[in-house]
Image (spheres, rainbow, N blue to C red):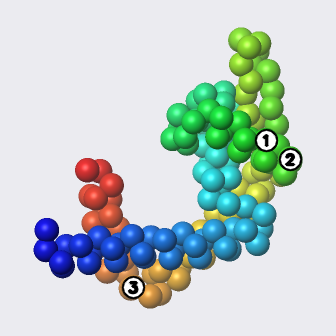
Amino acid sequence: MSGRGCALTLLLLDAARAVEARVEGALAEEGMSLAKLGALRHLALAEEPLTLTQLAERHCCGRSNVTALIDRLEADGYVARMIDPNDRRNVRAALTAAGRTAYARANAILAEHERAIDERLGQAPRAELARGLQTMREG
């Protein structure tokens, strides 16, 4: 591989880490994190409360990680655990009103970061970057 190809890969990884650090910092000011936001997003988009197994699959992490994450979200008042009415062995996670509010605030923070990216890149380069990143993510 040429040095140029490695430089692009490293630049992409560095940029991703920088964006992630800025977003995590802004979310932390609200008592939120990307992990918490991801779980809240899955719960907000679901038509019904999710089992922890379903949430782990959608969040692409292990069940023990989701259990710990739900513990934190429950302590924050953002999620409530409930027994699955169809199978009492299963626990489901449901978004609370406070969770919906926290999710909306976190999305507003992300939207502000999107606006900053738009201002730095401009509309056409941003669209081209989004297409390129989508292509890379797909395979």
Task: Give the percent coordinates (x, y) of residue 126.
Answer: 36, 77
Q: CA distance from mark 1 to mark 3?
A: 39 Å
Image point (66%, 30%), residue name: 52
- Residue 106 located left or right of residue 83: left
Judged left or right of residue 30, residue 44 is: left
Determine the CA span between mark 2 and mark 3. Answer: 39 Å
Q: Which residue is mark 3?
A: 121
Check disc 1 and report its element: helix, strand or loop: helix
Q: Which residue is mark 2?
A: 75
Lower sequence index among marks 2 and 3: 2
Tell me which amino acid carries mark 3. Answer: Leu
> As drawn, which residue projects farthest toward the left?
2
Query: Residue drawn 84% across and 51% down?
Result: 76
Relative to 103, say whether 56 is above or below: above
Where is 98 relative to 25, above or below?
Answer: above
Q: Which residue is mark 1?
A: 71
Give residue 127's position: percent from left, percent from top: 33, 73
Please state the horizontal and vertical placement of residue 74, each as a whole percent of the image. 82, 43
Distance between the Cα atoms at labels 2 and 1?
A: 6 Å
- Report the amino acid beneath label 2: Ala
The residue mark sitting in front, 2 or 3, is 2
Mark 2 neighbour density, 10 Å: few (under 14) some (14–19) many (20 or more): few
- Above or below residue 60? Residue 34 is below
Q: Quadrant of residue 109?
A: bottom right
- Whether residue 47 appears in this view of the structure is no
